[in-house]
Image: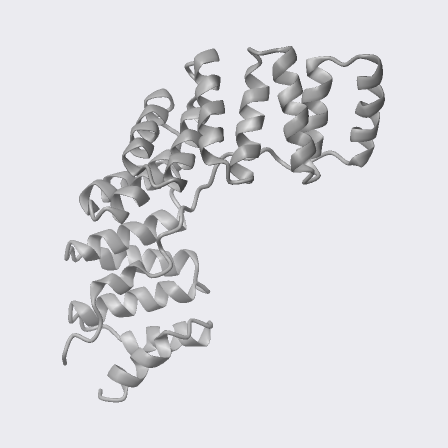
Amino acid sequence: MKKITTLSLFLLCNLIFSQDFIEPEKQGTQMEINELNTLIEKHPSSENYYYRGYFNYQNNNFFDALLDYDKAIQLSPNDFKTYYSRGILKIKTTDFKGAIEDFLQCILINNTSYKSYFNIAFAKTKINDFEGAIKDYNNCIKLNPSYFPAYQNRGMLYKSQNLFQKAISDFDKVIELDTNNLEAYQERAVSKAMLNQKEAVADFDKVISIAPQNAQAYYNRALYFINFKIKRDYCSDLTQALKLGFTPAKNVIAEVCSKK
């Protein structure tokens, strides 16, 4: 049987970052904003502006939130939490360079803030500064060696640069710290497949055992079997992928399964 699919297809739908910037949990209502409006009239402090900015952010009033954070920083120029929250807001509104500046200010105030390094790395990725992002993920990991999202995102960057062995090492660490991390098993499987490592099949199997409704997992495993001529029932995997809604499987089924 001829090799019908290049290994690049393993990378389909796997180039997003599974762990994004660190966003605060949603809470707060318009009632809190109204109460802070009254407070600010009487006590226009940096804290009151900060909290109104925070609740404006939670309610998707991003322009008002930015004005409040700006005012809070004007009144208290060394307040870590305000720079951090404004950095999150700037990421949310795609002002990635502005976000980097705010998180750098956070580090000047508190040089042990591993989450600030993580968010800088994320923002640098968004402006295609991959080398800089890797350095900041390194800094994040130095400060908190147990923070698995940094290994996960750094591994994705290595994989996007075809540095598959480095990517595998990072995904190994993710799995050590988070034993059922679906994305780490999937990305490690792809990386191993790209290096022609037979151990990839165990990771593909693990992905399906964790997420039996994941259509792409069946599709990727089928491609692995086909490309490396492994005697497994790849047609069943392709059929299951199609059944679960992954339409690219249809063309592969037509090409390889009708000839078996």
In terms of image quadrants, where is residue 33?
A: top right
Closer to the camera in the image, 201 or 217: 217
Left or right: 184 in relation to 38: left
Q: Position of residue 122 (x, y in %)?
A: 41, 36
Residue occupying image coordinates x 67% and y 36%: 58
- Rendered residue at 63%/29% (across/down): 66
Residue 88 placement (x, y as % from top left): 54, 32
Residue in the image at 20% along x and 57% along y: 193
User: Which quadrant does the N terminus fall into?
Assistant: bottom left
Quadrant where the C terminus is found in the figure: bottom left
What residue appears at the point 37 percent right and 39 percent down from the top-left corner? 125
Name the foreground residue: 128 vs 134: 128
Task: Give the color scheme: rainbow, by chain, secondary structure or one colour.
Answer: one colour
Image: 163 above or below 35: below
Q: From the viewer's perspective, is 197 left or right of 104? A: left
Q: Is residue 172 left or right of residue 93?
A: left
- Decide if residue 131 is in sight here: yes
Q: How many numbered marks are there?
A: 0
Q: Height in image: 63 above or below 168?
A: above
Expressed as whole percent of the image width and height from the top left, the position of residue 68 reads 68, 24
Whether residue 199 is visible here, answered yes or no, is no
